[in-house]
Image (spheres, helix red, strand yellow):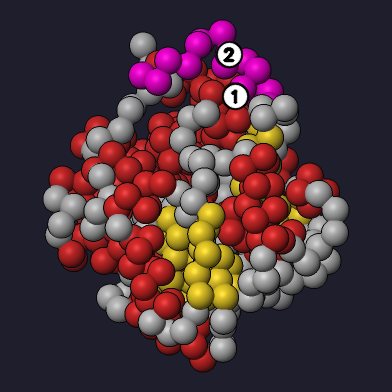
Amino acid sequence: MNGKLLTLKSANLLLAGYGALDQMGVEAKTLDIKKALMVTDQGILQSGIGEKVKAVLEANDVQVDLFDSVQSDPDIACCQACIDKAKSGVYDLIVGVGGGSPMDIAAITSVMCTNEGTIQDYFGVNLLKKPGIPTFLVATTSGTGAEVTPNAILTDTEAKLKKGIVSPFILPRAAVVDPMLTLSMPSRVTSFTGMDALTHAIESFTSMNATPLTDMYAREAIRLIGRSLRTAVARGDKLDARYDMSIGSLYAGISLANAGVGAVHALAYPLGGEFNVPHGIANGMLLPYVMEFNILGDIPKFAEVAALMGENVEGLSQVEQALCAVEAVKDLVDDIDMPKTLADIDIPKEALPRLAEASIDVTRLMNNNPRTVKTEDALQIFENAYGD
């Protein structure tokens, strides 16, 4: 019998496009929300976005309290502080506003208000027993896809690793993706969040668990990001580029949530855990080298990536087309505002063997990779990404 069982997990409600933020207020009123905890960071407050979200909720009769201490790539202690704040009040909505960090903290806070035990008890897959307080997740970057994924990631500082809570209870009541909220995003943040989204799209497109449904989202994500990331970095006020990136990131997140990702993310986890490398930067640097390794695992898919990214592949063999996809990603990284190699961000070369060993332990992701990765393969990928 041909074909896979098709399933699709996502937020209960998607609000995407111009005006999505205002519609979120209407949804809050429809749900008769009275009091919300907004979870965000100082950058979002300084940009004025936090006040916009607060105003929309208050205009719909929702009282808003604030937790504004989310760190970039947050650790367990940061998340626990938010949980303590949430438990000290009586909230019927948690609103995460920002990139992946505030959205993940909001999601974990929601479920830890209804599930007993500690955060550490729930690192893993499907360990949560109960749904949390309803959440609205408001994306202000175009990259993480956290608004539509059942994964929330924290840094375990003791283990020097990033760890995930994976459960359908992480998914929000509403995912809000309004391109207007991304206009103030600096070019550097645009670049590495955009590469994060492209990594989600390419890895989920070529994952072992890809389906025709996830391929539909991943293809469109690759196309939108491939044509608009350069413009969004160079001219952040161009609405059409910001729209493409917002929708492309959303679609990549939906594909990721259902097909999963692979070795790029597995190798990125120890980089973030030990050296605090922002997730999007780690993904962007590793992506072309993992793709190069993975080509033999799914030549037709990687060949298609080249065409989706706008490469002229007419007359080339499938292998040559697949190699064009790798070069297309390298060219994109060259053109945008982000570091290119591990050496550029001062990762010590002697750390590469232990990073390779740590990445192999991320079996949830490595098992989804289109080609089996051994420790020596992971080390070679890190060495290729290191540069001269």
Residue 9 vs 119, above or below: the answer is: below
Q: Is residue 353 magenta?
A: yes
Q: Nearer the viewer, residue 274 or 66?
A: 66
- The percent position of residue 218, horizontal first and vertical second, equals 44, 62
Residue 50 vs 31, above or below: the answer is: above
Q: Is residue 335 left or right of residue 197?
A: left
Name the residue: 51% across, 75% down: 63
Residue 13 vs 334, above or below: the answer is: below
Dot 2 falls on a residue whose secondary structure is: helix
Q: Nearer the viewer, residue 144 or 52?
A: 52
Q: Nearer the viewer, residue 18 or 109?
A: 109
- Mark nearer the N terminus (2 vs 1): 1
Most common secondary structure along the magenta stretch:
helix
Q: Which residue is mark 1?
A: 274
Residue type highlighted by circle 2 = Ala
Chain part drawn in magenta = 344-359
Residue 278 showing in the rendered view: yes
Residue type highlighted by circle 1 = Glu
Q: Which residue is mark 2?
A: 351
Residue 310 found in image quarter = bottom left
